Image (tube, rainbow, N blue to C red):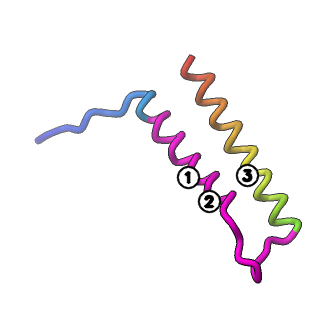
Amino acid sequence: MSYMSLPTFQDMRRNAFRLLGDAADELRSDWRVDAAPTAAQNDARREALEHIARAKAALDRAAR
């Protein structure tokens, strides 16, 4: 029976940064002209991007 080693904090941090970056890229992507976001959707997108930035900053602080 072989066991996988558990990831280090740095491994998890690196993966989380990549996933958060992917999510931010998706939120910043262009919208179809005929499906433009409403004001509420734009506000939610902006808020989500702020949360992503705070999550990345928290991971940076934890790595120090």
Which residue position is annotated with label 1?
A: 22
Instruction: Say if 32 sits above or below 28 in the image.
Output: below
Q: What stretch is highlighted in magenta?
A: 12-38
Q: Mark 2 points at which residue?
A: 26
62 with respect to 48 (left or right): left
Counting from the top left corner in percent of width and height, residue 46 is at 79, 53
Give the amino acid at mark 2.
Glu
For this view, does 48 lie left or right of residue 60? right
Mark 3 highlights which residue? 48
Q: Residue 58's image quarter?
A: top right
Q: Nearer the viewer, residue 2 or 31?
A: 31
Q: Which residue lies furthest to the top in this view?
A: 64
The reply to whether the C-beta atoms of the residues labelled 1 and 2 are less than 8 Å apart is yes
Q: Which amino acid does label 3 sit on?
A: Ala
Q: Position of residue 28 (x, y in %)?
A: 69, 57
Distance CA(mark 1)–CA(mark 2)? 6 Å
Would you identify the image quadrant in which residue 8 lies?
top left
Q: Is mark 1 on a helix, strand or loop?
A: helix
Most prominent secondary structure in the magenta stretch? Answer: helix
Residue beneath the point at 58% across and 23% down: 62
Residue 37 in the magenta stretch? The answer is yes
First in sequence: mark 1 vs mark 3: 1
| Circle 2 SS class | helix
Q: Contact (CB < 8 A) between labels 2 and 3? A: no
Q: Which residue is drawn at 58% across and 47% down?
A: 21
Quadrant including the C terminus: top right
Q: Residues within 10 Å of mark 2 (few under 14, many from 20)?
A: few
